[in-house]
Every structure is written in structure tokens, then in C-alpha cells.
Image: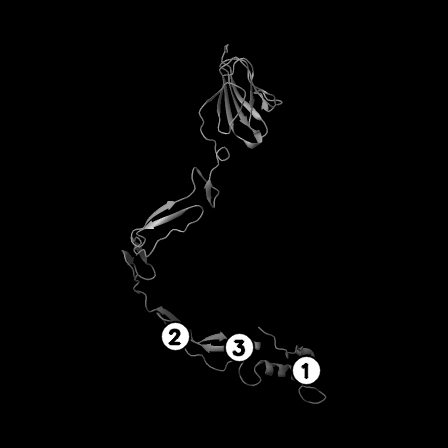
Amino acid sequence: MATNPNATQITPPRVPIIDERTGAVSREWYRWFYSLYNFAGEGTGILPVISGGTGLGTIPTNGQLLIGNGTGYTLNTLGFGTGISITNGTGTITVTNTLPDQIVSLTGAGTTVVTGTYPNFTITSNDAFVGTVTSVSVVSANGLAGTVATATTTPAITLTTTITGLLKGNGTAISAAVVNTDYFAPSAPVTKTANFIVADTEVWLINNKSGSTCTVTLPTASSWTGRVLRFQNYQARAVVSASSNVVPLTGGAAGTSILLASSGDSATLVSDGTNWLMTQYVPNNILLLE
């Protein structure tokens, strides 16, 4: 409750109501009575809002409520919209839904059914899309183009591309894959009868050089990371690399040895991007002891 700014605290036993000097009401009691006068509405009979009253001198009718208006109170009844009615009685307000069973309908093709009444509805539909295709077209992008037959009735889309060979994608476009860069092509075995340079497409290499060691120029390992080369010996002649770029089966420093001077031996080399690692060596003449 707000406090009246004119209220005066008086101690009645210590301050006489009548001033003995003047015979009139003492100043202290006058101020106290005057503060009550202000507090009670200055003779209007209406207790102000600041004093805890309503500031109104009107008797509310049935259903009227005190509604704040920013400076005080206004008496008014509750408003309502469509489907709601309000009955104001003596000390009562009754709110009623006057349209509880409204019809819900959906317009469209197919079999959509609405069941139930307010406020619980169930909508069941087995509809598939029903409509008419007015036009279908293909936009050329990312290396693809296309054509559409019967574009306005039952479209048949045919996609085409001018890219030949194997295709590769990067998430946004497609392009032709590059052999020995994006993939390694199958290769038939190749027999060598003299020193040789390994070609880009060769995988299976057979040494059939007689009379002396066969020297092989291997591809640059840094250009062929992951590439596999397989060597086999038809002669009892060693096969060596022209450079010290072959890491032996047991690891260590790179050397030149690929195959020993033993007919029937085979070995597998794999590029690690720096050298050619020997990952397998199978001798032809071997005795297993158990």
C-alpha cells in the first residue's frame, strides 16, 4: 500500500489535543487530523489509489472488474470474440464456448478424412500427389547435359556428358580421371630381354635378359605414390635398379637390388613417395624346415 506523504506520527499521551495556551486544537493534532483528511480523499468520500483505494466512486455492476489504465483503474467487463459468450452474474462471471462442434473440411483431390469433434480432431490421408506437369527441363552443369522427351506429360530425362573415359568427382563437378594419377590401369605382363625403363602403364615385369645383370630404371617414386611393380626372373641373372632407391625387405637404407641371380625368384615393390619399398620377395628354390 502506498504511504500518504502528509501522514504525521503523533504520540497522543505526550501531546495534548487542546493547546492550553489558546484553548484550540494543538498544532500537532491539527496536522494529524489534516493528514487523515488528505488520506481519505479530501472530503470526496473516495479513497485515492495512492492511499490504497480505487479512486472510483462508482458501484460496479455485475461482472465489472477493476482494470488498470496507466493512471488508475477503470471498471469494465471482459470482452470476447466469435464462439465465446460471457454471462455476468451477481459476484460471478461465466465464460462459455458457444461453438464447440465446428466442422473441419479439407479441399483437394484424394481421400482425406477428418473425424472427431472439437477440440480433438483426427486427419487421415492416403493421398498421393495429384497434379499436372507443365514443363521439365535439364540445366547443363558440372559436365552433364541432357534432353527431355514429352516434357509436359510423362517426362523421360536422358543425361549425357562430353567427358570420355573414367569419370571422377570432387563434390561439385565431374571430370575425366587421369590414368596412373587417379587410378592404375590393368596391365599384361611384359618380358624384357635387355636393360629397360619401366613405362607408365607397366606393372608385371619379367626379366629374360641373358649373359649379364639386368638394370632397370624405375619411375620417380615421388610421382607414383602407392604404385605397385611386380618383378619376376626367367634368368639366373640379378635384376638391379639404376639408382639407389630400393628399400630391402628387412628395411634400412635404400639400395639397388631387386632380384637375386636366381631363376624363378619374384619381388613386389611399392612406392612410398620417396623410395620403392620391397614388400615381398619369393625365392624359387627354398627349403622349408619344420
Color scheme of the displayed model: one colour
Q: Disc 3 residue type?
A: Gly
Q: Position of residue 53 (x, y in %)?
A: 53, 77
Residue bearing mark 2: 88
Alpha carbons under labels 2 and 1: distance apart: 49 Å
Q: Position of residue 128 (x, y in %)?
A: 30, 52
Quadrant location of residue 197?
Answer: top right
Q: Nearer the viewer, residue 207 or 57?
A: 207
Q: Are marks 2 and 1 in contact (CB under 8 Å)?
A: no
**Other-residue count near label 1 (Cα within 10 Å), few / some / many at <14 / 14–19 / ≥20:** some
Quadrant location of residue 95?
Answer: bottom left
Query: In the shown orientation, is residue 91 left or right of residue 109?
Result: right
Query: In the shown orientation, is residue 114 left or right of residue 58?
Result: left
Eyeballing the image, is 198 above or below 168? above
Alpha carbons under labels 3 and 2: distance apart: 23 Å
Alpha carbons under labels 1 and 3: distance apart: 32 Å
**Other-residue count near label 3 (Cα within 10 Å), few / some / many at <14 / 14–19 / ≥20:** some
Residue bearing mark 1: 28
Residue bearing mark 3: 72
The quarter of the picture where the N terminus appears is bottom right
